[in-house]
């Protein structure tokens, strides 16, 4: 059942693939929101490919820890990432292999606690919209249940046009409101022809859709640098 009672605004962040800058963009939004005086929290409900060890053991090694830091390190990590799955697989597969039964009520309880005293919640998914959480629930279903608006992060590389169009189509079929598409720079090298033209082509293919260019950020752990990148990209409109 879709949650329609919460007054907090929720922005789900999905990707067109893995390793395309989704966490960097989410952290940048959180850091910029704090600069603008917003009461922001962020969570990655299910995180796979890491071990649950204290932050001090290895620095900010996980996406959830980076999200927590971008929000000012004021939230309990167990709320930011209720489920930690060791194998770097889709949540459904990682949970099955670990013998873990995922509970949506547990995720919702964590979300309720995390939202207390805040007016914006950023919810980062894993991979793309059709990545399975369970056999019957994908991230598209999950974001819909939580009444999230959607931000699509796409790595600027060859093939991104198809990936963005497919993701927008799935989002629309799921009844999700796409607030924007972020074309993320994933390398500091000189752009290829495809990388240099992708943004303009997406403007032609998605008329009326908010599009943002997110630059390469050398220090992705620097909240000021991330906030500056978000502001320079025009992403204040999302906040």
Image (cartoon, rainbow, N blue to C red):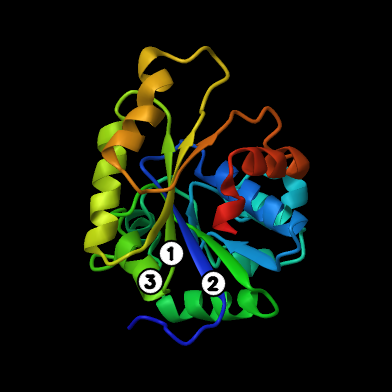
Residue 149's mark? 1
Do the residues under discs 2 and 1 have CB atoms within 8 angstroms?
yes
Mark 1 or mark 3: which is in front? 1
**Mark 2, residue position:** 9
Residue 98 at least partly seen? yes
Do the residues under discs 1 and 3 have CB atoms within 8 angstroms?
no
Q: Is residue 11 above or below residue 222?
A: below
In the current view of this chain or complex, which residue is farthest to the bottom? 5
**First in residue order: circle 2 vs circle 1:** 2
Residue 229: % across, % down: 65, 38
Viewer-proximal residue among 105 and 8: 8
Residue 54 at least partly seen? no
Residue 129: % across, % down: 33, 54
Residue 206: % across, % down: 30, 43
Secondary structure, mark 3, is loop
**Mark 3, residue position:** 101
Could you tell me which residue is drawn at 56 percent across and 44 percent down? 25
Viewer-proximal residue among 41 and 88: 41
Q: Is residue 91 above or below residue 224?
A: below
């Amino acid at each position: 059942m879709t949650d329609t009672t919460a007054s907090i605004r929720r922005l789900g962040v999905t990707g067109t693939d893995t390793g395309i800058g989704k966490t960097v963009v989410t952290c940048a939004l959180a850091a910029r929101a704090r600069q603008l005086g917003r009461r922001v929290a962020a969570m990655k409900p299910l995180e796979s490919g890491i071990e649950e060890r204290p932050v001090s053991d290895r620095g900010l090694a996980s996406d959830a820890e980076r999200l927590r830091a971008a929000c000012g390190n004021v939230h309990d990590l167990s709320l930011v990432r209720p489920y930690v799955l060791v194998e770097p697989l889709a949540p459904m597969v990682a949970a099955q292999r670990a013998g873990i039964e995922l509970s949506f009520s547990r995720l919702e309880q964590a979300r309720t606690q995390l939202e207390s005293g805040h007016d914006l919640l950023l919810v980062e998914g894993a991979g793309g919209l059709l990545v399975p959480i369970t056999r019957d629930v994908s991230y598209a279903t999950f974001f819909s249940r939580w009444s999230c608006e959607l931000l699509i992060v796409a790595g600027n590389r060859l093939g991104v046009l198809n990936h963005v169009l497919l993701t927008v189509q799935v989002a629309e079929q799921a009844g999700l409101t796409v607030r924007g598409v972020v074309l993320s720079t994933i390398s500091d090298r000189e752009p290829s022809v495809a990388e240099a033209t992708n943004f303009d082509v997406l403007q032609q293919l998605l008329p009326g859709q908010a599009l943002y260019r997110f630059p390469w950020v050398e220090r992705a752990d620097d909240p000021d640098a991330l906030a500056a990148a978000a502001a320079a990209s025009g992403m204040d409109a999302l906040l």
